[in-house]
Image: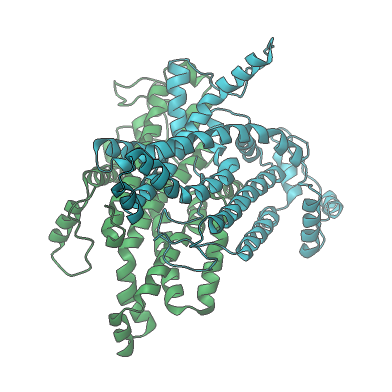
Chain colours: A green, B cyan
Amino acid sequence: MSSGTEGLAPGRGLLHIKLLVFWQGLGTLGRASLLIIVLFCSMAVFAPWVTLHPADRGSGPALAGPGGGHILGTDDLGVDIWSMLAFGARTSLIVALAAACLAGLGGSIVGTAAGYQGGWWDTAVMRAADVLIILPELPVVIVFAAFLGPSLGNIILVLVVFSWTRPARIVRAQVLRLKEEPYIRMAGLYGASPLYLMVRHLLPEVLPIVLVQMVQLAGRAVVVEASLAFLGPGDPTNRSWGMMINQALDFPGIHFTPYWQWWLLPPALALAILVTALAFLARELEPMADPRMRRS
Amino acid sequence: MRHARVRSAKAYMMTAAVLLILNFALPRWMPGDAFLILSGEDQSIAVAFSEQQRQHYLAYYGLDRPLAHQFFQYLAGLARGDLGRSYHYREPVVDLILSRLPWTLFVGSAAFVLSIGFGIALGSISAWRRGETVDRVLYFVLVASGQIPGFLSGLLLLMLFAVTLGWFPLSGAATPFREWSGAAGRYLDILHHAALPVLTLALARTGNTYMLVRSSLASVLTRDYVITARAKGLRSRRVRYVHALRNALLPLITRAALQLGGLLGGAVLVENVFAYPGLGLLLQDAVLYRDYPLLQGILLFMSAAVLLANFAADRLYVRLDPRITMDRTTGPLVPGTTAAGKEGTYE
């Protein structure tokens, strides 16, 4: 896969050289995935500028096919599909980013503290992780969303509650190993406080591994958000790909009309491509972040 | 070497306790109470209970008692196999769940067998031809198909095979209202309906098995005893199947046990795509109608299955691999090498 990986070396250096090394370390698959993800991100960020029609109200004839004024056609209310797709990318990516950052960083802080400090805090964290990791995620998320209401905030909250455990455990294991390293012990002997050690030495060391975890988490978050929107009536003012699929399937007899080709297919394909790209990126990053896990 | 965490029985008891408390607490967390909701639920006539009636019903259902008392009532009900009555179907929750269970088990286990079979076969091919074109193509296709959530690939399969080509029925588990002259026709009809859901579920799960077999077999193939076997002049087929594959499948056995637990909960979304009348479809109905007792009952069932499977997988792991000892925390938890993790939650 990835030949000549230099690793995400924590040393100082010129930024563009680091980026170049990073880019070359990624395999073809990783580069393609990264490009696709950047493409989706710019689609989300620049949604108002790359679309011609509003995404929340009708702007043309209902159920028009692609072409004409509407690049991808319109849905049953005459809403532009391309606009919904572009604005829907925002929902997916916001959930992904928020869940990944909160769970990834929160998990690594909790894990670092647990690994370094040990004691009751460690026990409590590991017990909690044990309990959470056995719970079946999707059914619990569905039921939670049903009880709490499927707002974006709630979805992110539930995702974070379920996802912090993995980064936390991985980071904890790394920290357990690292804190016996001579340079860390030396820093401790020179009077560095535990907080200083964690922020200055331990966290930067585990950060690459956490980043890989965050990319994986982002993929899962996209899937969970889409699944919930697909499954049930969420917040209808919130444009999302899952919601588009849900509405298209709710249209009576969509299977017997050609509408699904431009109404159902774009959000489904967008989701599939984004999720696959995130998965491959995570896989390509993994051996770079942790050279010991490098695949032959 | 593979590191695995084997959870103690205590962890399982605690998880079960958390689950029960969660199930008990969820409806009580919500704003308002059951009778405010019941009275506001009906869209046509919004019958509001008077404050006096509300108090009466709260007392009648014991909801004015101390929480601890209610909790023991709830546990006692569970012990008798009583999960309450569904608001929407007006039937005991247990009966509803049991009536849907066979369909989910049917498609789930068929997909399970298929995915394990394909996973082993394709994973072995990839491991033996590591780095060749076959391996690269398989790797790409299987990682992608394993990552794409089942409801999406299900939709695409539905559109392709059922809508465009018309090879398979669009939805359901059997042709409604059709009289079959013999049992064979009926069973064929059921198989015909199950084909696409099973294929979808299998597609989503094969990637998992594939990756495991591929990496496990690749590492086994570099071991000394395999090299010795080759050096002895054994035929490569014998080395592959008898020496290497057998040992490479060890981690798969526990993984498979885990997948069995995800069987009930794993098909939720796929059942919705195909309107397949299993537990997943029931769960969506429950969400749609805010049928809280039903939601809780299904959650309890699905979680219990996962819990049991995890427990079984852990025990199995220890029994099969004498190198593993029961230890609370061992070594780094490397992704993809855990004995027990979450399985099949995204289909």
With respect to residue B95, does B171 lie above or below?
above
Q: Is the N terminus of chain B in the top left, top right, bottom left or bottom right quadrant? A: bottom left
Q: How many marks?
A: 0
Measuring 48% from the left and 16% from the top, which residue is drawn there? Answer: B167
Residue closest to the far front: B232
Measuring 60% from the left and 64% from the top, which residue is drawn there? Answer: B11
- In the displayed structure image, the side of residue A210 where residue B9 appears, left or right: right
With respect to residue A239, does B13 lie above or below?
below
With respect to residue B337, does A119 lie above or below?
below
- In the displayed structure image, the side of residue B130 where residue B336 appears, left or right: right
Q: Provide residue B86's location: percent of width, then percent of height.
A: 74, 40
Q: Provide residue A271's location: percent of width, then percent of height.
A: 39, 38
With respect to residue A43, does B163 lie above or below?
above
Q: Provide residue A140's location: percent of width, then percent of height.
A: 58, 50
Residue closest to the far top: B181
Measuring 22% from the left and 61% from the top, which residue is drawn there? Answer: A7
- In the displayed structure image, the side of residue B302 where residue A257 appears, left or right: left
Of the pair B104 and B322, the residue shown nearer to us = B322
- The answer to whether any part of residue B217 appears in the image is yes
Q: Provide residue B317's location: percent of width, then percent of height.
A: 53, 56
- The answer to whether any part of residue A142 appears in the image is no
Residue closest to the far bottom: A190
Of the pair B76 and A7, the residue shown nearer to us = A7
Q: Residue B191's image quarter? A: top right
